[in-house]
């Protein structure tokens, strides 16, 4: 006999938050957004790379608002996330940036979608920063770079149990490759046969990208990270050419429009992608 009153199991989220050098205002905004979540079954695993007590001081203002584990780590985004993975106990993994914030129903929306689609191994969403597609669909090798960013990835933990972030990639890695760890992580899942879907209504708030001249070195490092994973995952020359040509075209358009800073930023991205691909692994 079916129990019509049985409750649907509640999905537990493990939010792995790597943080360093972030302002009190940014962290407080994120923690406040977690306090306001309508879906209350989650844990926050904070991997603190600061040398001061700023995170502990901010957390003191949120005692009792949500459960958390406060860890410390050497610098390196991928290294910190891997440490967080070791402590995760939830059914769903997420990786919020320390300057992003969630709308109150975000986790509830993700939980609803994952319950409705048990065949999905995970979901990625969009962001208030950058341009994102409006059409939902399955993520493939060809579109993972534009449909998956770490702070809007939600993956079933038991399906990606063997995956780790490549510690040579990402901010603070001490290598030339200043990004790409999230796409590499997602590609690991796809290459293992996992099914991940992009849902644009799953939107995470994030500050806009910085196109100022001072950010060009960051753009170049991020570009190298992309070139690195293109080579690591054996993308063909025509695919690499496409990814190098995109920022080149964007640079030319920005220049013609008189936006020198954006043109310079996109040019640095173009050069970085090519450098990351040609450099030996």
Image (tube, rainbow, N blue to C red):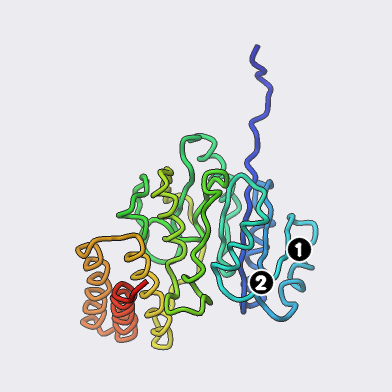
Quarter holding the C terminus is bottom left
As drawn, the label of residue 165 is none
* Mark whose residue sits in front, 1 or 2: 2
**Residue farthest front in this picture:** 280
Give residue 199's position: percent from left, percent from top.
Answer: 43, 48
Residue at horizontal 50%, vertical 40%? 113
Mark 1 residue element = helix
Query: Quick one: label 1 or label 2, which is nearer the N terminus?
Result: 1
Task: Report the Cα–Cα distance between label 1 and label 2.
Answer: 22 Å
Quadrant location, the N terminus: top right
Which residue corresponds to the image point at 52% horizontal and 48% vertical from the top-left?
160
Q: Which residue is mark 1?
A: 62
Q: Position of residue 123 (x, y in %)?
A: 47, 47
Circle 1 residues within 10 Å: few <14, some 14–19, many ≥20: some
Seen at 62% across and 63% down, the residue is 17
Q: On the rendered structure, is 200 left or right of 38?
A: left
Nearer to the camera, 216 or 274: 274
* Residue closest to the eye, 234 or 97: 234
Dot 2 alpha-carbon crowd within 10 angstroms: few under 14, some 14 to 19, many 20 or more: many
Which quarter of the picture shows residue 277? bottom left
Left of 138 or right of it: where is 11? right
Q: Position of residue 58 (x, y in %)?
A: 74, 71
Residue 73, numbered circle: 2
Left/right placement of residue 12 relative to residue 274 reads right
Expressed as whole percent of the image width and height from the top left, the position of residue 72 reads 70, 70
**CB within 8 Å, label 1 to label 2:** no
* Quadrant hosting residue 261: bottom left
Q: Nearer the viewer, residue 253 or 180?
A: 180
Q: Residue at x 73, y 60 (%)?
A: 69
Q: Secondary structure at mark 2?
A: loop
Labels in figure, total: 2
Q: Is residue 121 left or right of residue 273?
A: right
């Amino acid at each position: 006999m079916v129990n019509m009153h049985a409750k649907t199991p509640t999905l537990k989220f493990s939010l792995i938050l790597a943080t360093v050098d972030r302002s009190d205002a940014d962290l407080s905004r994120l923690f406040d957004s977690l306090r306001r979540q309508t879906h209350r079954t989650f844990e926050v695993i904070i991997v603190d790379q600061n040398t001061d007590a700023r995170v502990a001081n901010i957390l003191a203002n949120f005692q009792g608002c949500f459960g958390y584990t406060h860890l410390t780590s050497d610098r390196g985004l991928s290294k910190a996330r891997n440490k967080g993975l070791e402590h995760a106990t939830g059914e769903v993994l997420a990786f919020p940036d320390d300057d992003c914030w969630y709308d109150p129903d975000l986790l509830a929306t993700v939980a609803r979608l994952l319950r409705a689609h048990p065949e999905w191994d995970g979901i990625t969403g969009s962001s208030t920063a950058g341009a994102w597609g409006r059409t939902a669909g399955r993520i493939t090798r060809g579109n993972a770079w534009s449909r998956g960013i770490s702070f809007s990835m939600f993956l079933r933990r038991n399906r990606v149990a063997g995956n780790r972030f490549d510690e040579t990639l990402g901010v603070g890695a001490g290598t030339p490759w200043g990004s790409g760890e999230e796409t590499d992580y997602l590609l690991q899942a796809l290459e293992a046969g996992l099914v991940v879907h992009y849902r644009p209504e799953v939107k995470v708030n994030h500050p806009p990208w910085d196109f100022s001249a001072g950010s060009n070195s960051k753009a170049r490092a991020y570009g190298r990270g992309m070139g690195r994973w293109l080579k690591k995952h054996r993308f063909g020359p025509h695919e690499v050419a496409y990814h190098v040509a995109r920022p080149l075209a964007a640079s030319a358009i920005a220049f013609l429009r008189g936006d020198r800073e954006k043109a310079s930023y996109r040019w640095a991205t173009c050069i970085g992608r090519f450098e990351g691909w040609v450099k030996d692994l």
